[in-house]
């Protein structure tokens, strides 16, 4: 699957010639030149263990939580608690322990949104910097009461603000 890469500041404008290949998690600039991704750079610098860090189960759990956050924001955007989400759709998993984890993750996400005032606009879309010639896939892009932000979904850490990288 190839997706057009978009710049955070122009989220609705595909950048001509830049592409993302999901199967290899690779980004390419116009003319086909490979662009390093943020995960690759952090791994090469020793700040991340990359894919070697995750087990198959933890990767699946993370993917399920990412999808659950997206579903909440698309199908229950006004929900303020887990019970309101569960009135719209089920988050049950065949394993009761995984259901508890998923419910806890979604409840935490809703609490964080409510207390921070964050309003998500987009989830997991490819972006790149023409200046730095790097690319990445932020978890969540949205607004706080004082401006736009790109966030890491697991922790809510602010990666980019209206004024640039944090």
Image (tube, rainbow, N blue to C red):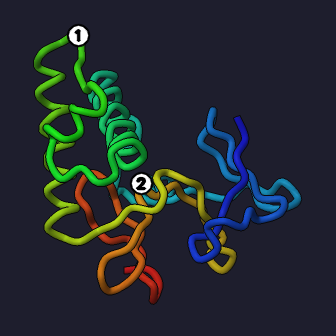
Image vertical order of residue 33 relative to residue 133, above or below: above
Q: Residue at x 38, y 40 (%)?
A: 71
Q: Which quadrant of the structure image shows residue 23?
A: top right
Q: Residue at x 14, y 31 (%)?
A: 101
Q: Residue at x 66, y 63 (%)?
A: 6
| Relative to 132, 50 lies left or right | left
Give whichever of 52, 69 is nearer the camera.
Answer: 69
How packed is label 1: few (under 14 Cα within 10 Å), some, or many (20 or more)? few
Q: Which residue is mark 2?
A: 139
* Disc 2 secondary structure class: loop
* Nearest to N terminus: mark 2 or mark 1: 1
Give whichever of 23, 15 is nearer the camera.
Answer: 15
The number of discs equals: 2
| Relative to 162, 93 lies left or right | left
| Relative to 130, 137 lies left or right | left
Residue 58 point in image, percent of width and height = 27, 29
Residue 35 point in image, percent of width and height = 67, 59
| Quarter that holds the C terminus | bottom left
Q: Which residue is mark 1?
A: 94
* Disc 1 secondary structure class: loop
Give whichever of 127, 134 is nearer the camera.
Answer: 127
Q: Residue at x 74, y 52 (%)?
A: 19
| Relative to 6, 80 lies left or right | left
Q: Which residue reaches farthest top?
A: 94
Residue 125 point in image, percent of width and height = 55, 53
Image vertical order of residue 121 relative to residue 39, above or below: below
């Amino acid at each position: 699957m190839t997706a057009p890469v978009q710049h955070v500041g122009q989220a609705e404008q595909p950048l001509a010639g830049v592409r993302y290949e999901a199967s290899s998690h690779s980004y390419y600039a116009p003319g086909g030149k490979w662009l390093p991704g943020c995960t690759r750079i952090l791994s090469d610098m020793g700040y991340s263990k990359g894919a070697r860090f995750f087990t198959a189960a933890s990767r699946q759990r993370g993917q399920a939580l990412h999808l659950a956050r997206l579903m909440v924001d698309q199908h229950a955007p006004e929900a303020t608690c887990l019970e309101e989400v569960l009135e719209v759709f089920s988050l049950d998993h065949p394993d009761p322990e995984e259901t508890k984890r998923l419910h806890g993750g979604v409840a935490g996400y809703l609490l964080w949104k409510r207390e921070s005032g964050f309003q998500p606009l987009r989830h997991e879309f490819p972006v790149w910097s023409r200046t730095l010639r790097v690319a990445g896939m932020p978890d969540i892009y949205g607004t706080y009461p004082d401006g736009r932000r790109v966030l890491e979904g697991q922790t809510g850490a602010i990666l980019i603000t209206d004024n640039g990288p944090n």
